[in-house]
Image (spheres, rainbow, N blue to C red):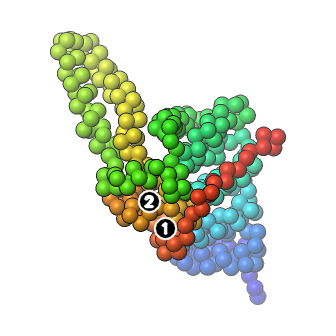
Amino acid sequence: MAKDSETIWLDALDSRKRGDIDSAIELAKDVVHVNEEHADAWMGIATWSLPPPSRGKQIQPTLKQSAKAMAALRKVVQYDSKNIEAWKIGGWILVDNLGMLEDALQWWEEYRYEFPKDVTPVIEQISILVRFGLYEECGEKISELFSGNLDTLSSQQAVRIDGVKRMVERAANMEKEEIFKPQDSTHPRWEVIEKMKKVKPLSSTFWLIAFIAPVVFIFGSISMTFLGGSIPGFILVFLMILGAFGFLTRASMGLLQRRNRHALDVDRAIDYETSSGKICIPESIRGSIVYNSMIKNRSPAIKERLDLLIKADEKISSKFILKIPTWDLEEE
């Protein structure tokens, strides 16, 4: 006698509980074969296709695992559009593991139609748009956050959007005279990158240790000489040092970005390649010190996907424009 979908689903959960992931996935596939609209089974396929956390840390999936999980997640939100976890995992996979940022913009836009007051998709879209140098669009999205049409930002979200706003401001200031467009093979920034392709970007940690810390140390030493003779003076100096460290760190991040602009440009070019599915980075730069420095920070799935794109050797059109979904306020 053939089992119904719920019975098979219970068998799948039992296999998952025993640690037999392969069996659990196959049984979940049997469930959706019997009942296409079984959202829980699709969610099981999606999450079980990803590598389990190790010591509490999420392991980055391969390209195959990412693609399988994403295909299943699309089914989840099709049949259970209120599954917030599915939306968030999908956004993570599209951005961090597939590099499909244009698709991610649309993914978060579809989330907005299910949760029109939620600020999460707007914040995620801003984080994507800034990577492409679309600062005007970023400004419009930031304005939406404070328009009164969305939920109030939580303290954690407020901290994040404050960081995103500063990042947008620094990036826009760095590129106020010339926004790099990697799809244009004649763009003058390619010449700059070519000249600096052997120069590694400085890490923020190195910047703090090599440049900020010595200045703060000197400032603290001088302050201690004049004010550190008493306990109140010592406390005052301590607070002054903390304030100076925070101020100098924020104020100097723009300098660090300008120093690393050639590397940030390469990072943007990689985003254009993974989003468009076509290549734009010249052979003389691909494999260079700066390229390798940026690619090492990408997930294994993105590296696999880039290898496939490079082998296909299909050039991006100079007219390529990122498709940005438009939110219709009347839908809210």
Q: Quadrant of the C terminus?
A: top right
Relative vertical location of residue 33 with respect to residue 109 in this rendering, above or below: below
Question: Residue 162: where, in percent of width, then height?
Answer: 52, 34
Mark 1 or 2, nearer chain start: 2
Question: Residue 8: where, in percent of width, then height?
Answer: 69, 77
Question: Residue 273: where, in percent of width, then height?
Answer: 53, 61
Which element is circle 1 on?
Answer: helix
Q: Quadrant of the N terminus?
A: bottom right
Q: Quadrant of residue 140?
A: top right
Can residue 148 be seen here? The reply is: yes
Which residue sits furthest bottom? 1
Amino acid marked by disc 2? Arg
The residue under the point 82% across, 40% down is: 330
Question: Residue 194: where, in percent of width, then height?
Answer: 37, 55
Q: Would you name the residue on which mark 1 appears?
A: 306
The residue under the point 29% across, 15% down is: 236
Can residue 301 be seen here? The reply is: no
33 vs 296, left or right, is: right
Amino acid marked by disc 1? Leu
Question: What whole-number distance in Å separates the C-alpha atoms at marks 1 and 2?
Answer: 10 Å
Q: Would you name the residue on which mark 2 appears?
A: 298
Relative vertical location of residue 107 with respect to residue 39 in this rendering, above or below: above
Label number found at residue 163: none
Residues at marks 1 and 2 touching, judged by CB atoms closer than 8 Å: yes
Which element is circle 2 on?
Answer: loop
The residue under the point 74% across, 59% down is: 80
Marks 1 and 2: which is nearer the front?
1
Question: Could you say which is closer to the camera, residue 170 or residue 44?
Answer: 170
